[in-house]
Image (cartoon, grey):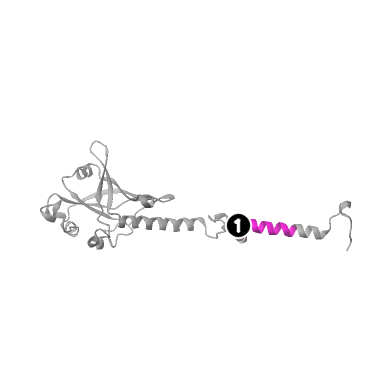
Amino acid sequence: MVKKNLSSGFIPFECYLVVWNCARVAVHHTRGSNAKLPREERLNSSVPNSPIPNYQVAAVKAKEDKQMALELVDTSKVAYLATVDAEGFPQIRAIFNARSKEHYPKLAPLFKSHSADFMLYFTTNTSSSKVADLRVHPDVAIYFCKPEESRGLMLSGRMELIDDPRIKKSLWLEGMERYYPAGCTDPDYTVLRLFPRMGRGWNQDHTYEFVIGGRRE
């Protein structure tokens, strides 16, 4: 092996090898295991050192948000209905959520096949201001929330006034005579139905939205 003083300006080949290997190690630790992935996968990865592409992560997150929204609808005792009156002013009121499994377990079978379409039923007085609003402006928003969990969901769509005796009877519960003295045939007893078109919500640290389709009667 030929040896020369470094002051001569000559750097031994072994030194080049050491520097080059150190550089490789530094790059490996900087990039992590993600550096082993093909370039396309590294560019599409939404999480550092993760081989999962952005669109797959987004799809999983969207599914989780939609499931969380459904759970909120199925557990909230009260919903908040927003309508617009004849003069164009928004009106909001609390309304019992017939879809709540905990509070109205006897009605649960009515919603068994409506997880995908988020279909909602409400009962109210035919003489109420909300029905008057809906006759003029049927487009509405319904809001569910659990403030203590930092969760909320708005569903929007066109509300229907249902006069089908079979549906009215299926939603009738003991104690409703308080509101409709003549029973389920009371002319002041009206059923509202909503097949939402879209949902927007917030879940703790982020917001989300989704389109709802596939209406099922």
- In this rendered view, identify the residue nearer to me: 95 or 212: 95
State the extent of the magenta-drawn residues as a range: 20-32
**Residue 18 horizontal side relative to residue 58, left or right:** right
Label 1 CA crowd tier, 10 Å (few <14, some 14–19, many 20+)? few
Q: Is 23 in the magenta? A: yes
Q: Residue 65 placed where, x, y %? A: 40, 55
- In this rendered view, identify the residue nearer to me: 122 or 38: 122
- Report the number of numbered marks: 1
Q: Residue 214 placed where, x, y %? A: 32, 57
Which image quadrant for residue 49? bottom right
| Dot 1: element | helix
Check the image and name the residue furthest to the top: 87
**Residue 186 horizontal side relative to residue 108, left or right:** left
Q: Residue 188 placed where, x, y %? A: 14, 49
**Residue 208 horizontal side relative to residue 217, left or right:** right
Q: Residue 110 placed where, x, y %? A: 24, 61
On screen, 88 above or below 36? above
Q: Return the residue at label 1.
A: 39
| Quadrant that contains the N terminus | bottom right
Q: Amino acid at mark 1?
A: Arg
Q: Residue at x 57, y 54 (%)?
A: 43
| Quadrant that contains the C terminus | bottom left
Which image quadrant for residue 3? bottom right
Tell me, yes or no, if residue 199 can be seen here. Answer: no
Q: Residue at x 30, y 54 (%)?
A: 76
- Magenta-colored segment: predominant secondary structure: helix
- In this rendered view, identify the residue nearer to me: 101 or 39: 101
Q: Is 75 in the magenta? A: no
Tell me, yes or no, if residue 108 can be seen here. Answer: yes
